[in-house]
Image (cartoon, helix red, strand yellow):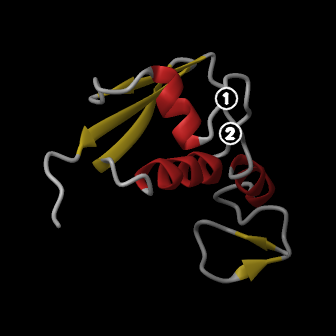
């Protein structure tokens, strides 16, 4: 059964007339294989340290769910206040804000 982005109800049709639901379903499963991974805003750590902490490796095919899981893993280190990510061509860019002080 397919869900159409234009209608809230599931549809068994191949398309609703406004979109191709089969194509929309396939698009959500797409992956991205970054040629490079850059970290910005975390000058106290090497790129390799951050990749290890996030569980990332070059050559990995990543879905958006995968990127979110790796971001969550990096945030669980407690070293960052916030994290954002984006792509620029075939580069995954992860922007970090380091924790400025620890509360005891």
Q: Is residue 6 left or right of residue 26?
A: left
User: Quadrant of the rendered structure where residue 12 is?
Assistant: bottom right
Give the residue at x 60% y 48%.
64
From what the image shows, is residue 16 above or below residue 59?
Answer: below
Residue situated in front as seen by the camera: 92 or 39: 39
Q: Which quarter of the rendering shows the C terminus?
A: bottom left
Label placed on residue 57? 1
Q: Nearer the viewer, mark 2 or mark 1?
A: 1
- The numbered dot on residue 62 is 2
Alpha carbon separation for disc pair 2 and 1: 10 Å
- Residue 15 lies left or right of residue 81; in this view the side is right
Element under label 1? loop
7 in relation to 31, above or below: below
Residue 27, x across and y down, in percent: 71, 47
Q: Nearer the viewer, residue 97 or 103?
A: 103
Rate crowding at label 2 as few (under 14), some (14 to 19) or many (20 or more) other CA atoms within 10 Å: some
Q: Is residue 33 above or below residue 71?
A: above
Which residue is situated farthest in the front direction here? 104
Q: In screen coordinates, is 13 left or right of 46?
A: right
Secondary structure beneath dot 2 equals: loop
* Residue 55: % across, % down: 62, 41
Q: Residue 102 placed where, x, y %?
A: 18, 56
Are circles 2 and 1 on residues that touch, CB within 8 Å?
Answer: no
Residue 33 lies in what quarter of the image?
top right
């Amino acid at each position: 059964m397919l869900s159409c982005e234009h209608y809230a109800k599931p549809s068994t049709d191949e398309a609703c007339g406004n979109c191709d639901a089969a194509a929309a379903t396939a698009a959500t499963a797409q992956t991205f294989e970054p040629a490079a991974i850059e970290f910005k805003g975390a000058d106290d750590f090497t790129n390799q340290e951050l990749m290890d902490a996030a569980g990332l490796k070059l050559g990995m095919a990543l879905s958006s769910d995968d990127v979110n899981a790796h971001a969550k893993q990096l945030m669980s280190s407690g070293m960052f206040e916030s994290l954002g990510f984006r792509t620029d061509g075939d580069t995954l860019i992860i922007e970090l804000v380091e924790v400025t002080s620890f509360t005891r």
